[in-house]
Amino acid sequence: MKVKVLCRNPDDYVRETTRDIQRVPRNYDPTLHPFEVPREYTRAMNATKLERVFAKPFVAALDGHRDAVNCMAKHPTSLSTLLSGSCDGEVKVWNLPTKKCVRTLQAHEGFVRGMCARFCGTSFFTVGDDKTIKQWKMEAPGYGEEEEPLNMILGKTVYTGIDHHQKEGVFATCGQQVDIWDEQRSSPIRSFTWGVDSVSCVRFNPVETELLASCASDRSIILYDMREATPLQKVIMNMRSNTLCWNPMEAYIFTCANEDYHLYTYDMRQLSMPIVMHSDHVSAVLDVDYSPTGKEFVSASFDKTIRIFPEKKSHSRSVYHTKRMQHVICVKWSLDNKYIMTGSDEMNIRLWKANASEKLGLLTTREKQAQNYSQKLKQKFQHHPQIRRITRHRHLPREIYSQRKELHVMKEARRRKPEVQLMCSERSGTALSPSKKKLSNVPSLLVSFFLKCKVLLAHHRS
Amino acid sequence: MMTSAVGVVFVGREEKKKKKTTSKMADAMGSKPAETHVGKEKRKSATKRYWQNTELNDPVKTEDRNHEKDSENHETSENKTERKKKRKHGPQGKKFISGKKDPFPGPAPVPEEKIRKFQRGQTSIVANDMFSDGSEILKSTLKDAEETSKLATEKAARFDLLLSEDAGFLEADEGEETCTIAQDDIADAVDITSGTKYFNLSLTQFGPYRLDYTRNGRHLLLGGRRGHVSCFDWHSKQLMCEINVMETVNDVKWLHSEAMFAVAQKKWLYIYDNTGIELHCIRRFNDVLRMQFLPYHFLLATASATGFLQYLDVSVGKQVAATCTKAGRLDVMAQNPYNAIIHLGHPTGVVTLWSPNQREPLVKMLCHRGGVRSIAVDKTGTYMVTSGLDRKLKVFDIRAFRPLQSYFLPAGASCLSLSQRGLLSACTGDIVQVYKDVWGTPVKKPYMAHRVRGAVWGAQFCPFEDVLGIGHGEGFTSMIVPGAGEPNFDGLDSNPYRSVKQRQEWEVKALLEKIQPELISLDPDQLCKVDRATWEQRHQERVKQLGYDPLAKEKFTPRHKGKGRSSSGNIEKRKRQVAHEDQRELIRQTVEEKLAKEKEIKEKEKKKAQQGQRSALDRFKK
């Protein structure tokens, strides 16, 4: 007789001393782990619920301005610095970790209309209602020194926006026309006009650095090449765009914040149709900024909320609001992809987490692993109705909630109208053809003009 | 003549040298292993490695060997250069310089059947034309997912090698049967710790005993018919509590851990903790005869004498479902560990399958001519073994609801139990028989047999141990059944050696991932499958709402071509070409269907013809 009976030595399974960690032998045999799918589903459900429980995006409020915050600028090299300009012409420099204002300067008389930091981070530019462009040192003046701009240019008209070139000492302002300035010279090296009375925003392309885009008050978006004498292209929309922002990763894509409550993402190479129409806001969208990864962007709206949109999705993934936050005028996404800064009408700058439920600070390896695991599970079961409902649920203030409902009703009515008309007409038997339907899906807001057909890419290669 | 003589001489020399090398090897291995490692010793031949036998065919290798042989008299130029290289590169460079190749390049292959063990579901093949409508992202996502799962499967299969324990076995000598080997002999033959696993508890007073092991097989709960309830750690034989409930005890069951157990008493269901303190008396559950605990759902399923199947959620203490089975007294019950379906056996010979979400049975199976005496389901949820009053033992494929084997036992069987590795215990009177692999080839003889002192009342294999616990009229017997238990447990799932802290941690985790009772269904993997029915329904609704099918194939409109190629005749021609293609596709499909049908009919006819040849006397054949 040959016999062997299972006999385990407890020493192999129990830790030697109490200071040791517990031994956990594993056996991945699927038959020892029944109900894999329902258990994973339950875990995914728990992770989704916990994500909502821990969704506390508000980090801090920076309080100190004496008028509404009109514009903000990120420091290109220091994550902890933020610049803000208010409607009374004051510019403040903030230290974000300490939440304190480190420097205040009276930059302009009247509004500070726009500001931007130089790419090296040593100085910054402001434009204001007093028709001046001022360049300031980033460092505070030493003891006994007076706060004075490095450089000042007095223009003929009011400037409404400014942006700096990514690599060279060149900046662009907008107002009645778009001007390109050399830092060393007091007159613009180039001016662009295209039958417009005023331009509200101008932005340099972060990759094709000679390229600019601007939003004009005649409801158009215009593209320029700095090296050329005339603008490149123009698309006219149904309503005015307030600002636009280039995608920092796929720099042929830009998103503009429109007065008609929507945001439109365009491909620069094909302006006839926007790629996506982002709609969730219930009032005019005032500002937009991309995350440094280019996967998402944040928009600030007159409806007192900010929303975060995935780049390719037409609806927002998150909405932030507080009781005290009024119309949000400007918004910035921090360069470490973790925070969002908003400046609003009631003189406050607010700091939000970009990912509402993210844990701040250092994570241990196990925490990270657990997070990755739950992230993957959430992704795996994202289409299950229960889980989708929980992930999508957001609390909204009552006005916004009811306005959204109202807008939805209006949209539905617009959608149904041709069907109803068809039903009531004589041709009630014939169905709508799909091709016709497709055309009606095109946002009728847009009429595009291609006054100048140029192959942009040919330029960019040079 | 001459050549042959030379040959002989040569062989002789070779043999000598071989001896020399082997003796040197023995020296190196045995007396001074450190020397060979350092490599200072002047060696004429490399020590023989374990792979050398396998590498006989390698040309480089054989060449090397020849060099070694010749090296005593003269060294070839090649060898000299090699030595120079050796000096240059030091001991690390040896591998390459010797000219040897890695005999096992790349990762070791994993056997197919091991990989199959870890495969879940079917691999979806992403064909190139599958997403022709341009959903490249979906395609690549699917491909990535497939790759990842393949990698995971392979890794898990590779990891299988590291499992530390092997399963037990029992082999008889020639001319001997394993079923004749007595328990005492086995207990003597195995080591002392294993020998102590065969023991008898003589409990004659409180009459036949039901028993239950915890999920990790560490603790044992005994419930005597006349009220005696005791639980103990049966490895150390340490008693945790012993009480007499002064009432009839129908069944006992551990809840999720060894901290609590449920006792079905004469009237109500009671829950005690492991010190014997009564925690709850649940009056909603009356006349309970049998209980099953679903560990991942935290549900206690009870079958009562009044014909009610009730589910109690033990984590919140609420009744989840109560179903009147309308089948009278329910005293045969089993759970399917694969999908948490409860199997009930009825006196009519029917086995019904129940989930808490449906008031009707999911399945009704007529299994026996007489009443059903006992049911057992294996852990993979593939096989169900039933025994009935018709003295038959039947094996069913519970996925396809198909009978596989039917055995006739002269005395019938009760108290069926299946072990983790698929051994079946069947009890007839006071004899316990253990069968091996009842669903494979028809079994002639039991694997083991043992006679206990009284009539058997309950039997259960201990998880993760080679032990079968038997509760009978005269107490309890723990019987050694080599090869019954799963040798390697998973520490995060059920760990027999867990500490209190580990248990607490596990309890929290298990409660967090408690599966909701709504998810109990015949196929537990349904959640990760594509819900086609709902999609089709939604699609139909959409079509109704829109007034056209958005997914319908668009009507072909020929493109306008210049230079006179868009004459009306040409356009018509192109239209026809496309239409012709579509038609061909349609025809191809219909022809295929037709052929399949014809084939089916032919096969049927063939069968009929075979049956037609039977003679009238065939009816007397069995």
Image (cartoon, coloured by chain):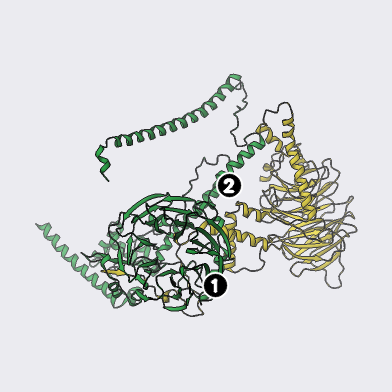
Chain colours: A yellow, B green
Image label count? 2
Which of pointers 2 and 1 indicates the residue nearer the eye?
1
Q: CA distance from mark 2 to mark 1?
A: 44 Å
Q: Residue at x 50, y 45 (%)?
A: B126
Question: From what the image shows, is residue B311 above or below residue A11?
Answer: above
Q: Is residue B180 left or right of residue A401?
A: left
- Write down the residue under mark 2: B137
Please tell me which residue lies in front, B9 or B611: B611
* Residue B284 lies in quadrant: bottom right
Q: Is residue B457 visible?
A: yes
> Pointer 2 indicates a residue of which chain?
B
What kind of residue is marked 2? Ile
Q: Is residue B516 visible?
A: no
Q: Position of residue A408 (x, y in %)?
A: 75, 45
> Pointer 1 indicates a residue of which chain?
B
Q: Position of residue A284 (x, y in %)?
A: 80, 49
Please tell me which residue lies in front, A73 or B290: B290
Q: Is residue B252 left or right of residue A299?
A: left
Dot 1 crowding, Cα within 10 Å, few <14, some 14–19, many 20+: few
Q: Quadrant of the N terminus of chain B?
A: bottom left
Query: Residue B504 shows which numbered tag?
Result: 1
